[in-house]
Image (tube, rainbow, N blue to C red):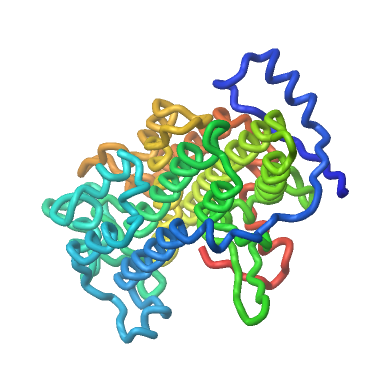
Amino acid sequence: MKKILLYTSLVATLLSCNKKEEIINQINEVEVNGSYDFTSFKTNSKQDSIVVGTLRSLLADIQKARPGKDADSIAGTKDQQLDANTLYNKYLANTPSLESIATSEFKTLIGNATTGLFKDIADASGQDYILVSPVPDNAQGGRYGGDAGYLFNEFGVDLEEFFIKNYLCSMYNKVFTDYLTSEKVTLANIDKALVLYGAPTSFPNGLTISVNGITYTDLFTAAYAARRDNSNGNDKGGFYTLIKLNFIRLQNALKASPINTVERDLAIMGIRENWEKALAATAINYFWSASGQFSKSNPTEAELASGFHALGEASGLLNGMKGITANKIISTSQLNEVLDKIYVNNSTKENNPIKLKSNPTELARLNEAIALVQNVYGFSGVQVNTYFKINDVTRRNVGYRQED
């Protein structure tokens, strides 16, 4: 039995202060036996793998509107004009569909083929655009940043990233509403949750590995948790490691006879809290990235596009969190405060994210947004100012480049 120190905090809204302290004291040292049991994983994960496959396919379709994206040349297309009906129909396709696990907030964001996000993506595709504020009348957005650029709406929001990052929060919500609750968790549901988290059963922590000719890598939230695995300090194991250990711990608790309900509930809380914190820390990382590009003395179009791309990732994650009805740390009002700070909520011609690059006063809003998120989650100064600025997969594997 491998003895592993596991530090996990608990959700404040669920437990009294005294109870929290008592349980935290009980779980400072946890014995995790063995590795993840994948015996029935393929069978258990079949339905949720359909959702993941559809999501990856739809995301690839949206990426065809990126300017000069190399991957698109394989299909002989780039800078492509997209069709809202085609995107929307793929969103509805298959059983289960992407819509079937989407939050109500995400469904409102999508709307239908004639209103909503897919309409915005289609309208912006196939044309170039210059990000300026105030925004011109009748602007629809478009490609910005040259061959290394991205697709933006008229207010400077990266449409591809706003789509996928919002949907990651729908996946979180599905897991902690239907799979990993004290009442509903089963060994089969643990496998289903792992699929939506995005990690293979080998938990490669950001690397791509090959086993018997089959390639495995982390996707979606798991990939971002791997980049933040320095959250407890370099080489000590952070969000990704804690989530991995708690998945194994949860399996062990359910295999015990009788079921170890205390370990079960602690493991669920450990997965949930570290999953959410990995998303929040990633939002901070992208705020830093945007700030770094916007603060350059004479940024190029490509650098500005990179900054707005990062801002789209951060705002997509935080906007998606508003739709989470499962237990979460951050409140909707706190999320709105951050999104208001960066002009993503209710953007107008005069007040929109493009303003953030205009002068130091506006740019300071990004630092204020970082501080708001930091205060909600209790992140330390060294986490925010050092660890969360780093892609820890790259740090741990010099020369290894993980896609954004």
Q: Is residue 172 visible?
A: yes
Q: Is residue 225 above or below residue 218?
A: above
Q: Is residue 128 above or below residue 95?
A: below
Name the image quarter holding residue 263: top right
Give the residue at the far front of this rendering. 257
The x, y position of residue 373, in whole percent, is 52, 34
x 57%, y 53%: residue: 191
Q: Is residue 145 visible?
A: no
Viewer-nearest residue: 316 or 245: 245
The x, y position of residue 44, in whole percent, is 53, 56
Q: How many marks?
A: 0
Q: Does residue 328 appear to the left or right of 162 in the view shown?
A: right
Q: Is residue 51 above or below residue 22?
A: below
Viewer-nearest residue: 202 or 223: 202
Name the image quarter holding residue 42: bottom right
Q: Does residue 2 appear to the left or right of 338 in the view shown?
A: right
Name the image quarter holding residue 392: bottom right
x 49%, y 43%: residue: 175
Viewer-nearest residue: 186 or 27: 186
Viewer-nearest residue: 224 or 210: 210
The x, y position of residue 397, in whole percent, is 72, 67
x 32%, y 73%: residue: 64
